[in-house]
Image (tube, grey):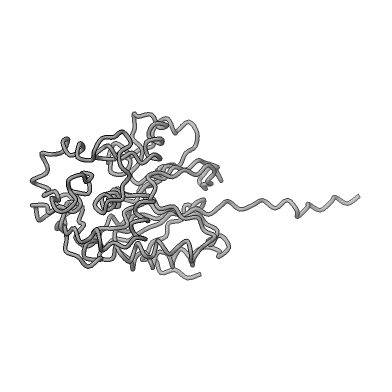
């Protein structure tokens, strides 16, 4: 008796395509080229249904922040079957603070209270003191300030207006750096975009392909990372609530303290993906995708899951 042929009815669904896009920093051409490369690399059916997570820092350093926001705002209408997630970076947070679209602190404390901890830096960083500064979040004042130093010795570059290099963002909207006119120049849809950015995003079932094969993981996306030594659940609640009473949000702007995956998350496979750090760093399930760091001569990169394929704006790709 001949053996029965295997049934073709039990088709295993391919893992969902998830693409995480690194810091763009005002470079519209890089973003356009990266998007074209991503579109050429994946089957249209999968690409058009993909989850695209932008890891933050859309503005500053590069010349076209306004055009970058226009591009991102238009994606949901151009690709209606994709899921788009727009994380806030520390630069975007500061931009939002300056134009007045951050949520008020939930504990009744004014933004002004947050200045005190860092007031010794006010003169050196030249904090903004123009229209509307009286109850502005610290990072908005720093973002629109005029830093005294000309040269950033850590990055090896000249400052562009402020410690955030926000000058090009002001210019992209047609106003001088540090001018309160920016508050009126930024269109309402851009303000809504800045107000709606999330500080953290979670996906419950994301696949990753490594030496162990295909693994099902949880994914947490946050611009800088999660702090080690602090309860992860409390960090997640804080970031989801967009609590603005602190003068500095570590999940958006931390460095060494958010580099690693908190030990608490190693018990169950959890991908933690970030940008922010000016590096491309892939170690186990810790993904840091910020190859460009806002430098004109460095690429903007994205990583696709489950394949872990890296795609850059400078790649010369064909279908």
Specify whether 111 is left or right of 315.
left
Note whether 216 is above or below 42 in the view shown. Answer: above
Q: Quadrant of residue 257?
A: top left
Q: Is residue 189 above or below residue 137?
A: below
Q: Residue at 42% x, 60% y: name it.
A: 311
**Taking 186 as reference, is 18 above or below it?**
above
Q: Is residue 144 left or right of residue 74?
A: left
What residue sits 11% from the left and 49% below the top?
A: 126
Q: Position of residue 87 (x, y in %)?
A: 38, 50
Q: What percent of the width, then of the height, locates residue 227?
A: 33, 35
Which residue sits at x=41%, y=35%? 237
Q: Is residue 167 left or right of residue 313?
A: left
Q: How many marks?
A: 0
- Provide residue 58's location: percent of width, then percent of height: 32, 57
Is 119 rendered above or below residue 175? Answer: above
Viewer-proximal residue among 211 and 90: 90
């Amino acid at each position: 008796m001949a053996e029965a042929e295997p049934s073709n009815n039990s088709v295993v669904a391919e893992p969902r395509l998830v693409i995480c896009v690194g810091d763009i920093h005002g470079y519209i051409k890089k973003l356009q080229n990266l998007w074209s490369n991503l579109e050429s690399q994946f089957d249209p059916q999968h690409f058009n249904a993909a989850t695209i997570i932008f890891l933050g820092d859309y503005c500053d350093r590069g010349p076209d922040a306004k055009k970058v926001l226009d591009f991102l705002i238009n994606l949901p209408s151009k690709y209606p079957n994709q899921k788009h997630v727009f994380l806030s970076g520390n630069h975007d947070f500061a931009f939002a603070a300056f134009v007045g679209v951050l949520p008020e602190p939930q504990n009744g404390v004014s933004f002004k209270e947050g200045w005190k901890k860092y007031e010794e830096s006010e003169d050196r960083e030249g904090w903004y003191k123009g229209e509307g500064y009286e109850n502005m979040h610290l990072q908005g004042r720093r973002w629109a300030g005029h830093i005294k130093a000309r040269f950033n010795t850590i990055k090896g570059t000249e400052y562009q207006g402020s410690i955030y290099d926000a000058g090009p963002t002001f210019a992209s909207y047609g106003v001088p750096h540090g001018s309160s006119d920016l508050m009126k120049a930024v269109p309402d849809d851009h303000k809504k975009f800045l107000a709606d950015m999330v500080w953290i995003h979670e996906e419950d079932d994301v696949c990753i392909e490594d030496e162990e094969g295909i693994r099902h993981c949880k994914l947490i996306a946050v611009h800088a990372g999660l702090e080690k030594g602090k309860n992860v659940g409390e960090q997640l609640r804080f970031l989801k609530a967009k609590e603005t009473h602190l003068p500095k949000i570590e999940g958006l702007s931390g460095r060494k303290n958010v580099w690693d995956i908190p030990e608490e998350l190693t018990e169950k496979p959890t991908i933690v993906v970030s940008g922010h750090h000016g590096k491309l760093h892939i170690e186990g399930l810790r993904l840091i995708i910020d190859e460009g760091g806002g430098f004109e001569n460095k690429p903007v990169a994205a990583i696709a899951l489950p394949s872990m394929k890296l795609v850059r704006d400078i790649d010369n790709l064909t279908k």
